[in-house]
Image (cartoon, rainbow, N blue to C red):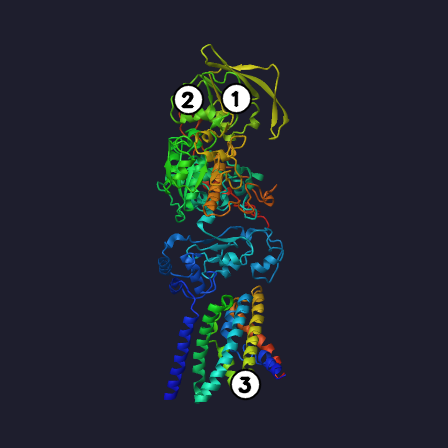
Amino acid sequence: MEYFELAIGCIFINNILLAQFLGNCPFLGTSKKMETAVGMSMAVVFVMVMAGIFTWTVDTYLLKGLGVEYLRTVSFILVIASLVQFVEMFLKKSIPGLYAGLGIFLPLITTNCAVMGACLLNISKEYSFMQALAASFFYAIGFGLALILFAGVRERINLARVPKALQDTSIGLVTAGMIALTFTAFKGMV
Amino acid sequence: MLEALLFMLGIGALCGIVLSLSSKVFYVYEDPRIAQVENNLAGANCGGCGFAGCSAAAEAIVSGKEAPSLCIINSKEGVEAVSRIMGVDAGSAEPPMSYNMCEGGNRAADKYHYMGVSSCKAMAVVFGGKRVCGVGCIGLGDCVKACKFDAVYMGPDGHPVVIDEKCVGCGACQKSCPKDIIEVKTLTEKLMKFNQKHDPLAPCAQTCPAEINIPRYINQLKNGQYKEAVQTIRMRNPLPLACGRVCPHPCENECRRGVEDEPVSINQLKRFVADYEMNSGSRLPITCAPDTGKKVAVIGGGPAGLSCAFFLRRIGHQVDIFEAMPKLGGIIRYGIPEYRLPKKVLDWEIQGILDLGIKAFTHVRFGEDFGLGSLMASGYNAVFMGIGAWKDYALGIEGEDLDGCYKGIDWLQRFSSGQEMKLGKTAAVVGGGNSAIDCVRTLIRLGLEKVYIVYRRTRNEMPANEVEIVAAEEEGIEFVFLAAPTRVIGDDDGKAIGLEYLKMELGEPDASGRRRPVPVEGSETVLDVDMVISAISQAPDPSFKDKDPHTRMDDLELTRWNTIDSDPATLQSSIPYIFTGGDAATGPALVVDAIGGGRRAARSIDLFLKGEAVVPPKDSLQNKRIHESIFTSVEGIRQIKRAKMPELHVDQRLDSMVEVDLVLPEAEAHREADRCLNCCRICYDPDTDFPIAK
């Protein structure tokens, strides 16, 4: 039950894109086509889970252990970047099939604020290891849900008559705002 | 402060060590050139090239799948640097360019009005678009939106216009177009394009055996762009000067204006722009694709061989022509008399083709001076056989071998070559085709007292061009219709002194739809002539097959008319690397047929050289008509007389071989071009004095 609540909370109520407004850059950049959106979502799930458990470990045993919590942000950046590089090398050698699918998206989210945000939220909410793992996964699912929903909407918008001033990113932002508004309906559910 | 510094240094060092270790452990060999190439790409990860990011593009370049110019936003220096890394010539990839096929735009009628849709894609979903025309531009500008380089804009006529200077050939517009209107093609693809069933083609362009874009060059002429008009013609026809003079213009029979009025004088307009180029004193540059390193031998320097060589050279192959006669040109040099196509004009035109870098060996006959074996030994990758149809059919009557009897093409050829020939006082030419007319018109110029043309049907059935028949009548040729020669009467010295014929009458129509002549018993009549020329069609001369010692030649199959057997859509013969075209493939036909055949064979040869399957173009129209584009009535036409061909007066032409047909004056050519309705598949510009409701 605890994890179910966590799932609802992370996916809908505190959706990382539509409630916390983190990671807007890939949200607008990779949502023009469904295909790209799906690839990006998969990559986010992968990286966010890896980064979530890794940073939790670093924070608990290194930063807290040495009493240098104030270095959290800067050290997380370093750790996440190295981790993504490592994963990229690992995939290329060991699982070339997966690398071919995710390869180009991995570098794009190396220092993405959604990933960073999820990791920092895990710490500030004082989650346990398992909770941090689950939360990272559900945040990523939430990210994917929002991105794929949005890509579907944008593909439809392409077929509609949009006033010139509002075309492309402008109408994208307006749409994103409206979707975010609907997500406020989840507030207070848990 | 110190502890923070130490901590960061420590964690940094740790990450560095782990990463460098793992880069050893997880090392995957990657061509070092990939990184080098990637450094020289634009690095925008824009995906414009069709690959997911620059590193994927670099990989494709290094693996040889793509050309160094793949990156669509790379600078010239960048492309050169990539080419250096790859060790290839930067020019080896032809730049593709986008171009628009439909010129109908707003003039095409709407079949419904539907508000609120802003993209062609969406509009195409609703009954295939709002326009009546099933293939034409919808005009909502998806291609304009798709272009990242501002190279496409919506023109004033409601169809997109491409700015060549800005186009990088990325293909985004083509992908965005729900119809097949805007296309991105390289020069080779444009040259090797054949009319397809779904193309926006005017009736004349469907009919032309060479598939010239007729409305386009007439429109260019109208706008004073004579050079562009010549280039448009040269995309399909390397011999505009010759065709402009001798083509019987089947296109004019299908001219849409011709439904209500006299057809546009298309061929005279072609001649006008072609003559403009020749008289301008300089040749227009003809662009060729980069060299491919393949070598093709073209046997026969007639219209088919010249056309095949011209197009093969333009798409980058090396071509050598082998010609049996002393000069190139084939039947249009030796079969068509000087007064129809001056040799000076022909020489100028052929020189332009040779200037592309085509070598010609003359006075070498296939099967005698060289054969298939020597061609293969010299490293030719494919062979085109355009040997024409030079062997006259015999009449098969008694006395045909008497002194004073000749055969049409043979006689014309010997005359053109300048051979001394004995002439009589009166002559009879048997046959009703253009060769027969060429013979009589040449004979009358040589000062004969009386020249007859003997044909077994009537004037209506004569296959010769109408203008030629009229000219022969004007020049005083006597026509003997419904006459079948039965024997040539000779005197004691074996000289011909008369031609006996049976009178005929027309009976039931035969397979060709012409009424079959039936002899009238006992109606033998004698024409007193001392020269008889039979010009009753020709066939290819198959003797090369026996003379060539190479045994492979036995595999070359001939039809029962002695033409080289080939697939009419690919012109590939029974020996895969031998292709054919022109009269050698079809039997006697038009010059423009041979030109179309030469290009068709060039396409097949190109496929063959690339190692691809030699298959016909998809949905090829192949000279059939698109049903919906052929009208039975045309609205909005005002009767305007067609330009009359200026010609030499009869008194001036009979004592010389000077060219009879003259070129239209400029003002007249413009007036004639204005008569053109600029047709497309189903839309056209009606005459402006009668605006019709759209």
Task: Give the secondary structure at mark 1.
Answer: loop
**At x 51% / y 76%, what residue is drawn?**
A48
Can residue B167 be seen at all in this image of the molecule?
no
Classify B212 as above or below B547.
below
Q: Quadrant of residue B376?
A: top left
Q: Position of residue B683 (x, y in %)?
A: 56, 48
Same chain under badges 3 and 1? The reply is no
CA separation in Å, label 2 and label 3:
113 Å
- Considering every residue shown, the one lying at the far top of the view is B492
Total count of labels: 3
Classify B455 as above or below B683.
above
Mark closer to the chain start, 1 or 2 = 1
Q: Which residue is mark 1?
A: B395
Same chain under badges 2 and 3? The reply is no
User: Along the line of sight, which residue is nearer the eye, B106 or B41?
Assistant: B41
Q: Which residue is mark 3?
A: A128
Q: Which residue is mark 2?
A: B446
Q: Position of residue B28 (x, y in %)?
A: 43, 66
Q: Amino acid at mark 1?
A: Leu
Task: Give the secondary structure at mark 2.
Answer: loop
User: Along the line of sight, which residue is nearer the eye, A23 or B317?
Assistant: B317
- The chain ID associated with circle 1 is B
Q: Residues within 10 Å of mark 2 (few under 14, many from 20)?
A: some
- Considering every residue shown, the one lying at the far right of the view is B508
Q: Amino acid at mark 3?
A: Ser
